[in-house]
Amino acid sequence: MRSRRFHMLVSAIGLSIGLGLLAGAASDAVAQDKKTFRMVPHSGLRITDPIITTAFISRNHGYMIYDTLFGVDDKMAVKPQMVDKYEVSGDKLTYTFTLRDGLKFHNGAPVTSADVIASLARWGTNDAMGQKLFSYTKEWKAVNDKTFQLVLKEPYGLVLDSLGKPSSQVPFIMPKAMADTPANKNVPDEIGSGPFRMVKSEFQPGVKVVYEKNPDYKPRSEPASNLSGGKVVKVDRVEWITMSDAQTATNAILKGEIDMIEQASYDLLPELKKSKDVVIKDLLPLGMNYMLRMNWLQPPLDNVKVRQAILHAIYQEDYLAAQIGNPEYYNVCGAFFGCSTPLATDAGAVGVKKPDLAKAKKMLAESGYKGEKIVIMAPTDLNSISQLPLVTTPALKAIGMNIEMQSMDWQTLVGRRAKTDPIDQGGWHIFHTAWGTADMMNPIANAGVKGLGKQGGFFGWTEDAVIEKLRDDYARETDPAKQKKLAEAVQKRAYEQVLYIPLGEYHQVSALRSNVVGALPTPALALWNIEKK
Amino acid sequence: MAAIPVMGVVAIFVFLLLRLSPGDPAAILAGDTATIETIAAIRADLGLDRPIPEQFITWFGQLVQGDLGRSVLSKQPVTTLIAQRVEPTLSLALCTLIFAIIVAVPMGILAAWKQGSWLDRGIMALSVAGFSVPVFVLGYVLIFVFSMKLDLLPVQGFASLSEGLPAFAARITLPTIGLSFIYIALFARITRAAMLDVLGEDYIRTAHAKGLKDHVVLVKHALRNAAIPIVSVIGIGFALLIGGVVITETVFNIPGIGRLVVDAVLARDYPIIQGVILLFSGIYVLINLAIDIAYVLLDPRIRY
């Protein structure tokens, strides 16, 4: 009797394993499903409100379910998206916009002027470009359900650039009921009018997000171009599957269990390149930028000569080699507004491309620096920037600075950098971070060149009336040639005062199965136009 | 009843520990380019600007009503988030435990029975290997062999039992094998040691003298008397499995509780951390209770 039970147990285990093997084959077949697109995003989606946070993953979610009034094309020119047509009055004070026909939210309600105005008001509370636009705004008013007007106090050169801004805190259009949520609270629902609908029942924060094609979406007739043109959805379902381990994601795409890795690990690219089933693409052609940010409230960094000495001690190539390694994916870049944008310039770029240690030492001596301790916050858990403080520390020690590199996790750093306290009470001197070029491509979008100090400035609280005047002049200017001149002036001033130190541009490439076509190079993540052959 | 004060102390300790540790959920929520005004507004909305005792009273008041609060980041109820992650973790823990017991206990019995033989040494060598090989290394090796080279099983992911046994088995097999290695090593060693203690007893010699077959002596007389330490270790092992599978969950991309709590710690998502640790403390209390009950069943001399 006992023997029979034992055999039954063994048989059951064998059967389970056998069935499991069959299931493996079956799961591969599922992965071949051409109407479901599975991808590994760069991070897990937890915050679904793209206005309350600047997190890229929330922005990407926004592009899935919401639509925008304007979008940028391949040449970074702003083109109408939800807007059918617009007019600007002769005095440049009144913009009249008319929405396209047939725009509907996922709940079936039509998109109206009231929804647009409420959405823009909420966006204008949090976003830097939105805040600037609203500071020039007299009023927004609905002419009728499809037509609305922006009335300005004075001419403003960045109206369309603001409404068509491509990256974080994008002016997405939500139903008024959602957009009336205060900007410091998450919106309570996921209703947009974009090309995809979120399947809320399958949402697992940080694990999986599922979207389905929005059958009511009416794409524009123009071909898709960057974040403008026809957003034609060619798959029925998109799954974002978070994988915190890069090796697991690599194995999964090699095996065909997923169709795309948004940001492939540099270390594992050689393995991916060996496969004929996987292609590597740069879908973020504007790239990303490393930066070194100093705290102007903390002596001795309140002294511009000390900051300039640090600037002259920095060599971008060291950072890029340490953090990225392969020169194929980075380039030395001294531009504050991106090296491949309309405002790209080398104006004022000193030091970063060619360090001058002798000059740095001389400037430090002239500054009156007396060996005060400089605290560098070093995030050890954020692989994408963890090497940067390790380069800064010896570089500054080499010119005679007293450096204390304090290791911590990124979230501790994020909490601590908001502190304006002195060093002995948890304050700090230097941290490093990375921003997408799309978030810094002009003097208004780039929070790093704000000169507002503690009243609205980015951490480090750079305060400079001259740069604020230049930014205002830039914002008012409507002639692109003059805007470019002003942007150059902003950059020169930023280098003179050392608002931050650019540490180079790099490119995060994507891995796609070779049967995936139509992936668009964009500053965000665009999954319309993609199909599996 | 003793569980209630234990969990109460855990609740207070975890709450204070989180509030006194560095990091700010509001800054994390606001993102990289937020201003201090934005962060302050979010902090006020989350109630994090209020005094810690006031925050604790609010949280504890919700807790006694069964409300663990909502995630700071996703705004989902913590109970929902935990419920989403329970099945993968429990499945992995139970499969690992069952597989480890099935493999390890006979190995331990055999090793004890054949003490000093090549079989004993071989099993003990395997046990040392089980303790020595990190679980992530073993996981990658299993994936490389069975998924990438032999193409027999999927690389990653979890399928619920509701999706069918074949899908479930396909996804759970490799993580179970990978995770069970160390538990096989542990259980085999404990079983061997406990059996060796018992096999030297007079009643075992008596049983042999009565002419009973070896397997009857080993299982009916020796194993039953050696079971107390084995059950204790299995119980502790299960408790460790519930809370300690995060590496396996990461390597095999299983959305379990381990990853939930690690992600929450990294994001300073206080309500999730508090909720999961309370859950863990409850599970630990229940497992200890189950072990105590098992003692009574295995040895009628034990009384509480």
Image: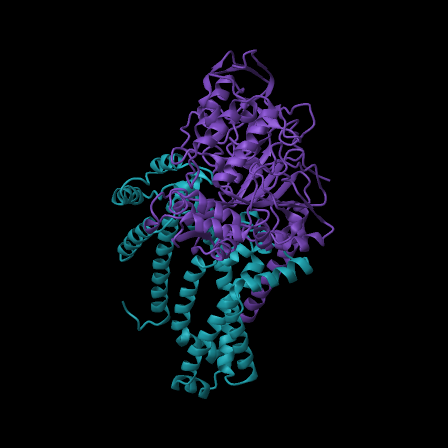
Chain colours: A purple, B cyan
Residue B6 figure quarter: bottom left
Horizontal arrangement in the rendering, residue A154 relative to residue A488 (left or right): left
On the image, the x and y values in percent for residue A499 come to 48, 40
Q: B302 or A48: nearer the eye? A: A48
Q: Residue A497 versus residue B241: which sits nearer the camera? A: A497
**Up-down: is B12 above or below B126?**
above
Left or right of B49? Residue A143 is right
Q: In the picture, which quadrant includes the C terminus of chain A?
A: top right
Q: Is residue A55 visible?
A: no
Q: Tell me, yes or no, if residue B274 can be seen here.
A: yes
Q: Position of residue A296 (x, y in %)?
A: 41, 42
- Count up the numbered dots: 0
x 58%, y 67%: residue: A7
Residue drawn at x 67%, y 58% is: B148
Relative height, residue A262 to residue A389 (above, below): above
Viewport quadrant of the N terminus of chain A: bottom right
Residue found at the very far bottom of the displayed protein:
B209
Among the 4 quarters of the image, the one containing residue B25 = top left
Q: Could you tell me residue B216's position as x and y percent?
A: 48, 78
Q: Position of residue A177 (x, y in %)?
A: 44, 24
Image height check: is A72 above or below A98?
Answer: below
Q: Nearer the viewer, residue A487 or A67?
A: A487
Of the pair A281 and B166, the residue shown nearer to us: A281
